[in-house]
Image (cartoon, helix red, strand yellow):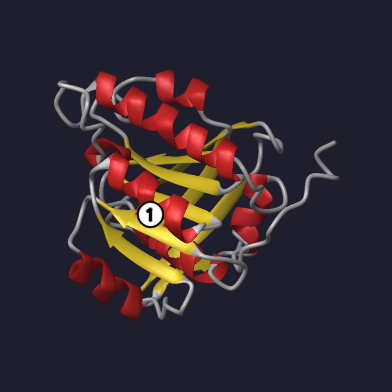
Amino acid sequence: TLEETPRVTTGLKELNRVLGGGVVAGTLVLIGGDPGIGKSTLLLQVSGQLSEHGKVLYVTGEESASQVKLRADRLAVGGQDFFLYPETDMTAVKKQVEEMKHNFLVIDSVQTMQEPDLTSPIGSVAQIREVTADLLQIAKTNNITVFIVGHVTKDGAIAGPKILEHMVDTVLYFEGDRHYKYRILRAVKNRFGATNELGIFEMRDHGLAEVANPSE
């Protein structure tokens, strides 16, 4: 049952609740939202918290390592089990996971990752589908939690095709207006919890803070 599924709780209670109580090993979690809304900030903070429970590999294809490092420093994220890896080649990512035996993997973002044996361009439906299938296998084979960042395109779909939502275990949307400080996290699919939970956050200088009493 859902209650008996072993979970790792993050330091963000709002996220734990939306996930159904915490992070489940061996699952693939997609976090979608508009570019620049704070998905990377959320996942960097969570990565820092999860690194207290195991090894975290944060793969960045969007920004350079130094850019992410600057943001991580601002969010006070770091530690000996937090590994930053600037890479877009899925073969290299798989090799890293196999060698280092990470417990958590973050892919930022699925649109920047590439299967070298596919001729389709990066970000195409074929690439995104194949990359996601690969990540699903990594999650299930190694029993690790994989988070994927997926940017919502202009027509409102994550990474173009809706097919991603069928392939993953959990789909979270991170929403808000870039000009305002509040963000909403909601589950639209969750094999390990309800889909009617909302998490409310406030974007501050040092990252996302939880809003425990939204009515205030």
Dot 1 amino acid type: Gln
Position of 169 relative to 45 (above/below) = above
Residue at x 85% of width, y 45% of height:
4
Give the SS element for disc 1: helix
- Counting from the top left corner in percent of width and height, residue 13 is at 65, 62
Question: Which residue is at the front of the view, 51 or 141?
Answer: 141
Position of 214 relative to 167 (above/below) = below
Q: Quadrant of residue 187?
A: top right
Residue denoted by label 1: 96
- Counting from the top left corner in percent of width and height, residue 181 is at 38, 62
Q: Residue 182 vs residue 62: left or right?
A: right
Regarding residue 157, the answer to whether it shows in the image is: no
Question: Which residue is at the front of the view, 115 or 34?
Answer: 115
| Position of the N terminus by quadrant | top right
Position of 159 relative to 43 (above/below) = above
| Position of the C terminus by quadrant | bottom right
Residue positioned most to the front? 99
Residue at x 44% of width, y 36% of height:
135
Question: Which residue is at the front of the view, 186 or 91?
Answer: 91
Callout 1 crowding tier (Cα within 10 Å): few <14, some 14–19, many ≥20? some
Residue at x 25% of width, y 75% of height:
70
- Counting from the top left corner in percent of width and height, residue 53 is at 62, 68
Position of 34 relative to 76 (above/below) = above
- Counting from the top left corner in percent of width and height, residue 46 is at 50, 63
